[in-house]
Amino acid sequence: MKRLLITIFALSLFAAPALAVTPAEDIATTIMLRGYDCGGRQVTNIDEQADGRGNKTIRATCPNGVRYQINISADGRVQVNPLR
Amino acid sequence: MLHSNLPVNLLWRLAVIIGLTLLSACACKHDVNALSAGKQAQVEADESIAMAGQRQPRAMDNSKDVQNLIPGSAVQETDAKPKQAPLEAPSKHVAVVAKSDGKASAADEAEKKAGINLDMLIKRLKQTPAIGVFTKLAIRGDILDLKDEIQSYKQKSMLQSKLDDIRARFDGLLIKIMALLQADPALSKDLYTARESIWKSLLGGST
């Protein structure tokens, strides 16, 4: 009986699907969307900077070890460049 | 028996847990239905994934190369273009272009049956949690690039000759978005159903 209850409780916890995307996944997807290899679905070492004009610069490391810089202009244009 | 062995408090907890389980089971069933609905569109899309996968990255690399060749092109674009809401405008011209076609294709009929509104579709795309903010911005940039390209071809009166290429790019972009919408299969399916309307609005909206 106790085991059954624990099972039901565990099932109820894991039943709801996880929809939201984390920033690490979002950045990795953006890198891949621009045609670059990332080697995984999540980046690490995210460094985010914004200037006064609304431009944003993000630096992140992919699982394959390559570090990328993502520039997002004030009007929403996204540019990805690998850092050497 | 059971009542005598277990305290009332525990029985209440048991009832709450069972209720939660039933609720989550209903939610799962709903997701499964949505998944099966989106599955058909995904299967049809899978056939052209390979083709689009070859074409789209090349097109993106080209645009990237152009941006690299012109220093500060992003800033120039900022100055040149008025601020535009993401993924907007094309829907305004749908009705006009659809009327000019005369015959309604099977895709149009399917879209009418589903009762899909492009404005709502755009709103749902903006709001879906299945795609992150940066990814949405990147997709928006791709769509705007495609629109600009169509406009430039129109100005040079080369649109008809380049229509196949542009359509291939559009299909590739659509498939990419659908692939990103794995966690929102209902939206993915609706996007696929409305693809002809989106295409027409893209052509009509860039005049």
Image (cartoon, coloured by chain):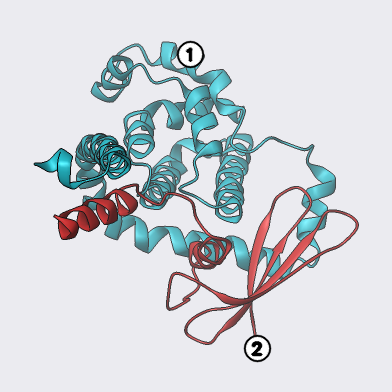
Chain colours: A red, B cyan
**Which is closer to the viewer, label 2 or label 1?**
2
**Circle 2 crowding by C-alpha within 10 Å: few under 14, some 14–19, many from 20:** few
Mark 1 residue type: Ala
Q: Residue furthest front?
A: B4
The chain holding disc 1 is B
Q: Quadrant of the C terminus of chain A?
A: bottom right
Q: Viewer-proximal residue, B173 or A12?
A: A12
Q: Residue at x 49, y 40 (%)?
A: B128
Q: Quadrant of the N terminus of chain A?
A: bottom left
Dot 1 corresponds to which residue?
B95
Determine whether B50 is above or below B125 in the image: below
Front-lying residue, B194 or A40? A40
Residue B141 location (% of width, % of height): 61, 49
Q: Residue A79, position in %: x, y? A: 66, 63
- Mark 2, residue position: A84
Task: Give the Cα separation between the discs numbered 2 and 1.
Answer: 49 Å
In the rendered image, is residue B202 in sight? no
Q: Residue B122, how many percent across, how many down?
A: 52, 31
